Amino acid sequence: MKDIIKKTTRIIDEILIYFIHNGIKDVDIKIRSDLKQIKIIFEISDVKIFRDDLEEIERYLSLPYQCDIDEYFWQLNGIQEQDFNLELVGMMINSYVISKNNNKLILELIKNID
């Protein structure tokens, strides 16, 4: 259970870094968990995000889950020149849902608990 907590907080950290890097200042985070999965929900208000940004997020988060990346994510973190690692987050989660309604963006990440 300790590892899943660390992985969850690292996922949150990477997503927040991405959003802050892109000028987002108002983010609410909800975490819902049960014995089978953890859901991390980001609600971003007054968002001015462009289609290219959404496509970038979806491209990275659509990468298939990779058990090896999930297990060794901590060693990979920080090796890239950019300040965030959305592609690693994509390989650590099992699915996601992203929606935009008016000026609100909702990103839900789902990670199964093994």
Image: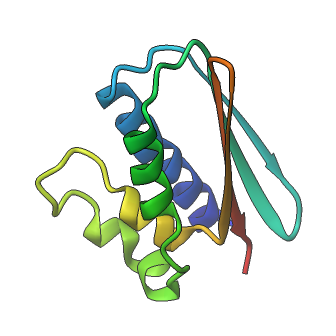
Residue 98 versus residue 27: which sits nearer the camera?
Answer: 98
Question: Which residue shows up at 58% across the image and 54% down it?
Answer: 8
Residue at the front extreme?
51
Question: Which residue shows up at 68% across the image and 19% down it?
Answer: 102
Residue 23: % across, % down: 35, 20
- Give above or below for 79 relative to 105: below
Question: Which residue shows up at 88% across the image and 59% down it?
Answer: 34
- Give above or below for 2 relative to 16: below
Quarter of the picture holding the C terminus: bottom right
Total numbered labels placed on residues in the image: 0
Residue 37 versus residue 106: which sits nearer the camera?
Answer: 106
- Give above or below for 8 relative to 23: below
Quarter of the picture holding the N terminus: bottom right
Question: Which residue shows up at 85% across the image and 70% down it?
Answer: 36
In screen coordinates, is 29 left or right of 19?
right
For residue 74, which quarter of the picture? bottom left
In screen coordinates, is 84 left or right of 49?
left
Residue 42: % across, % down: 64, 35
In screen coordinates, is 78 left or right of 1?
left
In screen coordinates, is 102 left or right of 56?
right
Residue at the left extreme?
81
Residue 5: % across, % down: 62, 56
